[in-house]
Amino acid sequence: LLTGDLARLGAHAAGAGPYRLIKVTEGESARFERNPSYYRRDPDNGDAQLPYVDALDVRVIFDRSTQRTAFFGGQIDAYWPASGVEARGLGNGAIVGRDPSFSFVSLTMNPKAKPFDDPRVRRAISRAIDRQQYADIIYSGDAQPDGIVHWPLGSYALTPDDLKTAYQPFDLADARKLVEAVGGIEFKMSYPSTTSIEEHGQHLPIFIEQMRAANIEVIQDPLDFGAWIDTYQKINYDSSLALNQIYETPELPLTFHTTGGPFGDESYVHGIGDGDIDAAVHAANSATDATDRLDKVHAAQKIIYEKDPMFLPLVSPYMYMAYAPRLKNVPSGIGTTSYFINTYWLDA
């Protein structure tokens, strides 16, 4: 399947999930129908065959006021409010679910490019980032600062206190000292110039101002979305204020720092290229015992911090989904994993 070739999905999509993609119109809609071969049954309802809903119609509606009108007009059964403020003010019988978002905006630095080959530069930039400011300004406090492993992953993430005090403290004075010690810091940063995904455009001015406060100069390199993806995939950048996929396990956030990068083929990022990091991440990602895995994920993060990370997630917000009252038994609190829990139904 070629990237962006959505027309082929209707005939060539493969999978074993609860629904089959029947039709897709790029930028407009998609229809999914129940997979008759789906394996799951509902043990709480006499082993009834899942899913209960016959079909899902997904509509692409860019205008938020139109989304809201369609929701309260009964044309759609669910939509994402823009913020917690909007979600809490819906009323009219709307049911609101609150889940952690498993994605984030990050700064990705190329440690093979100057000035990021100097760990003191990476440390200065890290010390200059006040993550709470993003949470407060962009999300009205409805977000939390991320470490290398983002907070929605629960106990896999290091504690907020450990991050603040030991591993990635916001310390403007220390950042300025490091800038002076290396003789000044100036770097080029690419980013997608026209996107509202993950509120990227709101992160950008905050980041630029935080760097300026630490006497770090950022040369901005805005690119259209396609060109940005191309430069990111080919690592044709010095640094990038990047969008990220949904990460529901710690594997990929950790492997960003390894020699081969997140996919082992040196695409998207150059890791730090350190044997200790590679070994620690491999140990964490190959552990099968739950307690052992947790300990090794923590240990890998601490080793990466010792070497000054080149991949710095900023914050992950909460996201809200509004449901019509006739939609029942919708799981909440588990992020996009809820898509696999398909025991919801519609009142007749």
Image (cartoon, rainbow, N blue to C red):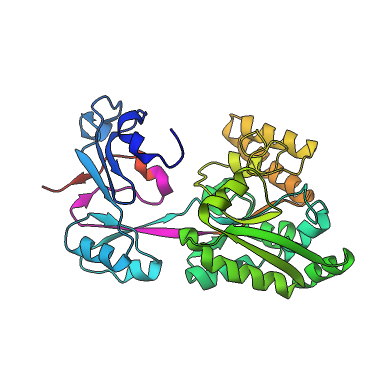
The front one of 16 and 113 is 113
In front of the other: 295 or 168: 168
Tell me, yes or no, if residue 197 can be seen here: yes
Q: Is residue 321 left or right of residue 178?
A: left
- Please provide percent x and percent y for residue 164: 68, 62
In the image, is 190 to the left or to the right of 249? right
Q: At x 56% / y 66%, what residue is drawn?
A: 203
Residue 277 located left or right of residue 319: right
Q: Nearer the viewer, residue 270 or 316?
A: 270
Question: Which quadrant of the view contains residue 255?
Answer: top right
- State the image coordinates of residue 218 (x, y, percent, origin top left): 71, 66
**Where residue 156 appears, x then y in whole percent?**
59, 45
Which quarter of the picture shows residue 12? top left
Give me the residue at 43% from left, 42% from top.
4
Residue 48 belongs to magenta span = no
Q: Quadrant of the N terminus?
A: top left
Q: Which residues are magenta?
A: 316-337
| Residue 170 shows up from this direction | no
152 vs 300: above or below: below
Residue at 51% from the left image edge and 47% from the top image edge: 245
Above or below residue 327? Residue 42 is above
Q: For the point 52% across and 50% down, which residue is it?
A: 226
Q: Position of residue 311 (x, y in %)?
A: 67, 51
